[in-house]
Image (spheres, helix red, strand yellow):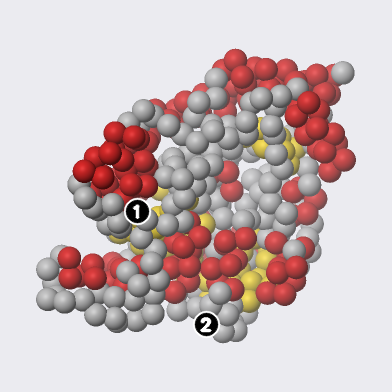
Amino acid sequence: MINFNVPPYTGKEIKYIEEAVRNQKICGDGPFTRKCSEWIEQKTGTAKCLLTTSCTHATEMAALLADIREGDEVIMPSYTFVSTADAFVLRGARVVFVDVRPDTMNMDETLVEDAVTERTRVIVPVHYAGVGCEMDTIMEIAKRHQLMVVEDAAQGIMSTYKGKALGTFGEFGCFSFHETKNFSMGEGGALLIRDEKYIEDAEIYREKGTDRSKYFRGQVDKYRWQNYGSSYLPSDMNAAYLYAQLELAEEITQTRMDRWKEYWEQLTPLAEEGRIELPYIPAHCAHNAHMFFIKTKDLEERTRLEAFLKERGVYAVFHYVPLHSAPAGLKFGRFHGEDKYTTRESERLLRLPMFYALTADQVEYITEQVKAFYHG
C-alpha cells in the first residue's frame, strides 16, 4: 500500500531528542525551540517567530492579538480546515465565507471587498497547497478599509508570492508542523509576527498570561499574571524533531518538487485529453510541492477513482468539506455571494500521495493506475 502521507524523517531526529533530554530542558522554549524560531525568522524575514503547539493555536493567538470581540466579522474562504474559523469563533466572531477561485482553490480576491461591512475586522487568506493568494489585492483592500490580515499559511512554509515568504504579508502568519506537512514535529505550529509592537503581548498570551519570557531574559525580577492567555508552548523534544528537518529544508523541498514534477509530466497527457485537470501555479508564485491533486469530472467519478486506486494499493484522498455547509458553519457564519465554485470544485478534487520518502517508481506506479482508470 502506498500511503497518502508518511511523516518526514531525516535520521537525526532521535539524536536531537536525546540531546534535548540530556539538556534537562524538555518543556517549552528550550534550545531547540529557539533554533527553530531563529531559523524561521532568518528564512522568512519576519520580525518574530513563536513556535506553538499547533497551527490552530497560532491562529488563536492571532485572534487574541487582533482583539477579536463578540459580533466582529472575519472574511475567509469556506474551503479550508475548521481551525481557520474556530480561532475567531471562539472569540465570538461571525465568519463570512467567500467563494474560491477554481484555478488555485484560494479565496477569490475579487470578491473580498464586497463582503466587507462595518463589523469586519480581519481578512484571512488561506494559501491552499502552498500556492500564494493574490496578496497585493488583499493587502490593498485591508489598507483601504483599515482591516487586519491573518495569513493561514499552514501549508505554505518555503513558498513565496512575488519573492516574499508566505505568512509575512499580514500582521500575523500561521504555519503548521503537523505530521502531514512538509516539515513536522508531530503536532506543532508557528506564529509569525510582522510588527514588533505585538511581540510582548504575544509572549504573554503564549505563556499563560504571564510575563515569564521577560523573567527568563532577566528583564523583570519575577514573573506575574498580566493578562488572559494559555499554554501555547510546544515541548522542546518536539522542536528537536522539527529542527532535524529544518536543517535539510532545501533538500526536502527539492525532493518533493521532483516528485511533483514527475506527477505533472506523467499526467499531462490525461489533462490534454480533457480527462482530468492539473494544479495551476501562477507565474509569480513559487510553491513548496506540499500537495499534488487532480480534478475529476464530478463527485461520482472521483469516488470511483478513489476506490479504484485503493483496490490497487494507492491511498488517495479528497480534502475539505466546505465549512459553510457544515452544522457549525451554518451556526457561526454565512456565505457571502454565490457558491459558484467552492462546493463544485471541492467535490472534484482528489489528492495523490505526496511525502518526502515517496519514490519516483511509486509516482510512476500511481500515475499508471490513474491512466488505467481512464483508459480501461
221 displayed left or right of 124: left
Tell me the crowding category of disc 2: few under 14, some 14 to 19, or many 20 or more residues within 10 angstroms, Cα based: some
261 displayed left or right of 24: right
Q: Is residue 298 above or below residue 327?
A: above
The answer to which image quadrant residue 250 occupies is top left
* Residue 333 or residue 44, whichever sits in front: 333
Q: Amino acid at mark 1?
A: Ser
Confirm or deny contact between disc 1 and disc 2 (CB under 8 A): no
Q: Which residue is mark 2?
A: 69
Q: Position of residue 281 (x, y in %)?
A: 59, 38
Q: Amino acid at mark 2?
A: Arg
Query: In which quadrant of the rendered image does the C terminus lie?
Result: top right
Question: Would residue 160 be visible to someone looking at this image?
Answer: no
Point 36% across, 28% down: residue: 11
Q: Nearer the viewer, mark 1 or mark 2?
A: 1
Q: Position of residue 44 (x, y in %)?
A: 35, 48
The answer to which image quadrant residue 85 occupies is bottom right
Tell me the crowding category of disc 1: few under 14, some 14 to 19, or many 20 or more residues within 10 angstroms, Cα based: many
Q: Position of residue 217 (x, y in %)?
A: 15, 65
Q: Earlier in the sequence, mark 1 or mark 2?
A: 2
Q: Secondary structure at mark 1?
A: loop
Q: Position of residue 201 (x, y in %)?
A: 32, 74
Point 71% across, 24% down: residue: 313
Q: Which residue is mark 1?
A: 235
Point 39% across, 29% down: residue: 10
Q: CA distance from mark 1 to mark 2?
A: 30 Å
